[in-house]
Amino acid sequence: MTYKLGLKLWSTNTESYLREAQRLYSLGVYDYIELYVVPNTLNTLENWKKLNIPYILHAPHFAHGVNLASSEKFEYNKETYREVEIFRSSLNAKYTVIHGGIEGNIEETIRQLKFINPKNFLIENKPYKAPLGNQNLCRGYNIEEIKKIISETNCGFCLDIGHCICSANSMNIEPYLYVREFNKLNPKMYHLSDGEIDSEIDKHLHFGQGNFDIKKILGIISKDKCLSIETNKNSKENLEDFIEDVKYINGK
């Protein structure tokens, strides 16, 4: 197995997972942390620096008020991305994963990305529907929008397998075929969890709790890339469920 496996954490997780993250990294359970930067958490940065673990960042998204597809959010987006850049430079993060936004239009997403110009950023594909009560449309839900962002901003690509399957279901496309088509965009890295193969909503289930054909998916994607495990956390005290997810991947 040659995947570089990633542990997904939030910058606010300093009270819960820091010690466990250090211990598991020292044991070789995973290779890097993908750190979601919650806005206004620069006070946690020194804690993450002390771990001395490789990082990939995930920029804040709609759940924290960031929406690159909305011109009304431009000032807030800029301020938030200034914080992301401080995290990136301080942690020497390899990539920053970014969402294209909600509703709005893809041209506005591209305009803001050109202005903000995040360093080493990867655009992540999204489901057609956001997991919100009003089922908002996500920007970057299809290959065409992702291609447009890549070509006009010269960024890289993060392929989220669950998002891809959800989007395929919304558009009545065979899910694994769409994973293959998205993979032709040469992703720099992947996000993976289990889920329901016929659902339009991403569930972030632990491996084996859904019905994704994980072995088939691993046969499609590249083996030499970063692969962040994006399953839910069951405990605020330990990462035992993450360890089981790693074992599942390594056994496939």
Image: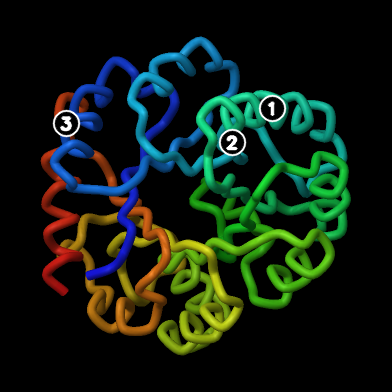
Q: Residue at x 43, y 68 (%)?
A: 161
Question: How far apart are the alpha carbons under marks 2 and 1?
Answer: 8 Å
Q: Earlier in the sequence, mark 3 or mark 2?
A: 3
Which residue in the structure is indicated by mark 2?
60
Q: Secondary structure at mark 3?
A: helix
Q: Which image quarter: residue 241?
A: top left
* Residue 231 percent across, percent down from the top left: 29, 51
Which residue in the structure is indicated by mark 3?
23
Q: Are marks 3 and 2 in contact (CB under 8 Å)?
A: no
Does 21 sit left or right of 192 as displayed? left
Question: From the image, which quarter does the C terminus lie in?
Answer: bottom left
Question: How far apart are the alpha carbons under marks 1 and 3?
Answer: 31 Å
Q: How many marks?
A: 3
* Residue 25 percent across, percent down from the top left: 22, 39
In-front residue for pair 35/104: 35
Q: Which image quarter: residue 35?
A: top left
**Residue 80 got which mark?**
1
* Residue 80 percent across, percent down from the top left: 69, 27
Q: Few, some or many C-alpha atoms within 10 Å of disc 1 (few <14, some 14-19, many ≥20)?
A: many
Q: Few, some or many C-alpha atoms within 10 Å of disc 3 (few <14, some 14-19, many ≥20)?
A: few
Most extreme residue toward the top, as rendered? 43
Q: Residue at x 73, y 66 (%)?
A: 150
Q: Secondary structure at mark 2?
A: loop
Question: From the image, which quarter does the N terminus lie in?
Answer: bottom left
Q: Few, some or many C-alpha atoms within 10 Å of disc 2 (few <14, some 14-19, many ≥20)?
A: many
Q: Which image quarter: residue 92?
A: top right
Q: Are marks 2 and 1 in contact (CB under 8 Å)?
A: yes
Q: Earlier in the sequence, mark 2 or mark 1?
A: 2
